[in-house]
Structure formats: C-alpha cells, structure tokens
Image: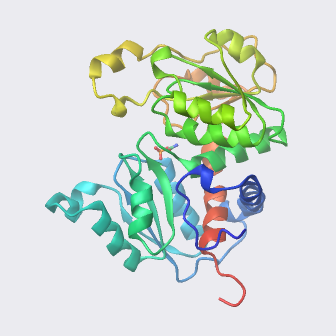
Amino acid sequence: MSLHGRDLISIRDLSREEIESVLAAAKKMIPFAEGKKVSHSLENKIVAMAFFEPSTRTRLSFESAVQRLGGSCITIADASVTSMRKGESLHDTIRMLSSYSDAIVIRHPNEGSARLAARASDRPVLNAGDGAGQHPTQTLLDLATMQEAFGTLSGLTVVLLGDLKFGRTVHSLAHALAMFGAEIVLTGPPSLALPLQSRRHLEHMGAKVREQSDLHAAVRDADVLYVTRIQKERFGDESEYRRVAGSYRIDASVLADAKSRLAVMHPLPRAGEIAPEVDSTTHAVYFRQAALAVPVRMALLDLILGARKGD
Ligand code: CP
C-alpha cells in the first residue's frame, strides 16, 4: 500500500512491508542526505515543524531532510512564542498550520496529541514524539541503523535498557522488533519496567520477550544494546526520579564480555547512561544512528509527500 498522503502517528500504522520499503528508500537517500546528489522531490512543498517540547535531532534532521529534498519549512520551536500563550488550543493551532503547509511534523508532551493533530489537519501529520507514547520515525532510523550494522533485522537479540515505562522510543521500537522476530530482553530499574499492557501486546504478537535483571548477563548475549535516558520530565514526583537516577551506566567494564559485534545504540540525548570512553569503541553506533535520521526522514517525506508521476 502506498504511503502517499498518509499520517504516521504510531509505528503500528505501518506494516512490515511498508517499513521495509522505507528502509530500502532510506539506503538510496544516503548520497542525497550527504549532499553528493540533488533531489527536487519536495520542490514547492512546505513542511511545518510544530515542536512543543525540546528537540535537537528530530527537528533539525527533519528540517535538513526537507531542505535536502528541495522543500522549505515553517517552524514552531518554542510554544511560548505562539498564540497558545493567549489560550489558543492545539486543535486550532494545527488547523491553521494545515492551511499554511503541505505536511505537519509534531512533537508534544501529551500522549495522544499527534492523533488529535491528525484529526485537526487535512494534511499528513507525522508524530515526532507524543509524551510517553510513540516516536515512530525514531524507530525507522533505529531499524536502519541495525540493518546497516548487521545486514539484516532477522535473528537479532536486542536488549532494551533503562526507562521502558516513559520511553516513547522503546514503545515504538519494541513493536517493530516483534514484527521482525527479534528476541527482546528487558532490563533496567524495576520501577521503570515496560508497562504491562505493552508487554502483553508484544506477547500477543508472538514476540520472544524476557526480563534480565543482571545487566552484565544481558549484555553478554546481546547483538544490540539499546540504552535509554531516564525521562526526568515525565516524573510527577522529583523524589521518585532521584531514586532511580544514575542507577545504570554503560562503560568499558560493562562491555568487557560483550560480543565483538555488539552495537550500542541510544536515541540520544544521553545524560550519563553511556560513559564517553565507549564513544571510541567499535560498539558505539549512536552517532551513526543520529546521522541516519536524515536519509530515513528524507525517504519517509518523499514517500508521503514527494512528487509522483502525473502530479
Ligand atoms: N532522539 C530524539 O528524539 O532526540 P531529540 O529529543 O533531540 O529530538
């Protein structure tokens, strides 16, 4: 099925075949993302960036992707300078944006906000993170990184470490990993475990999923170690955050018994979960992961919005 004109709110909106088609297109986009080839696929298209929460990678890689495809952006990078300060609703804000642009990329602290935006907009809406909900475009670039590192997404053992309760990247990624038959190992502070509903969903999909409280044991068996930051901004109570802050850290000693091909990933930003000494090891792929954001988002925008024959 074509992605043209579609929203992307949850990774569940995509079939395995559609994910594979985005990944194949992303691979071809790499020389365009690096400026070695030129595309005009989004010529005359405007993409609105509606970011109501801080972002470095997601917003800037989307903006880079649009511009590499010959399109242009209008951007809200700070809700405090919009008329939402005067009481305008998210619904009305998005409805306006949909008449100023050809697609909307939204990040918002509230779970469900991207779905609300999609209902308010008659243009495609892409979810760039809705609270503790979903971050589907991050998942696409995570999968692209694994595919580049291993040549395949089949048969991988992937350890998800950290804040599995509030971490929207893992909520999206776990579903995709289940689709591709990965073995999923969950580890981290018990109070930040994957919500039961998400765990049940993975099991319902037939996923191989298990918990491993011993981080060293988890790392020893892993092909991918996907580290996440504790999402401090989602805690209602600061003292609860302090109880788990700093409870895990990946450094050379944790990686001592890892497989030589272990890929350490992180959606970034990191806040102490990966020691800088890991950066210079062959395990560190998190900066490559961040770089692949551009070709992956280019591929997605091209498929959703790009010029088609006869347009
Ligand atoms: N990975 C990610 O979403 O990063 P930003 O918060 O910087 O966009």
Q: Position of residue 285 (x, y in %)?
A: 68, 35
Between 87 and 30, the one lying in front of the other is: 87
Q: Is residue 189 left or right of residue 224?
A: left
Q: Position of residue 198 (x, y in %)?
A: 56, 34
Q: Is residue 307 left or right of residue 237?
A: right
Q: Is residue 298 left or right of residue 188?
A: right
Between 50 and 285, the one lying in front of the other is: 50
Q: Is residue 241 visible?
A: yes
Q: Position of residue 254 (x, y in %)?
A: 65, 12
Image quadrant occupied by the C terminus = bottom right
Q: In the rendered image of this protein, does residue 271 appear above or below residue 295?
A: above
Q: Residue furthest bottom?
A: 310
**Tally of numbered tags:** 0
* Residue that appears at 72% across and 70% down: 37
Q: Is residue 17 left or right of residue 34?
A: right
Q: Residue furthest left?
A: 86
* Residue that appears at 47% across and 13% down: 247
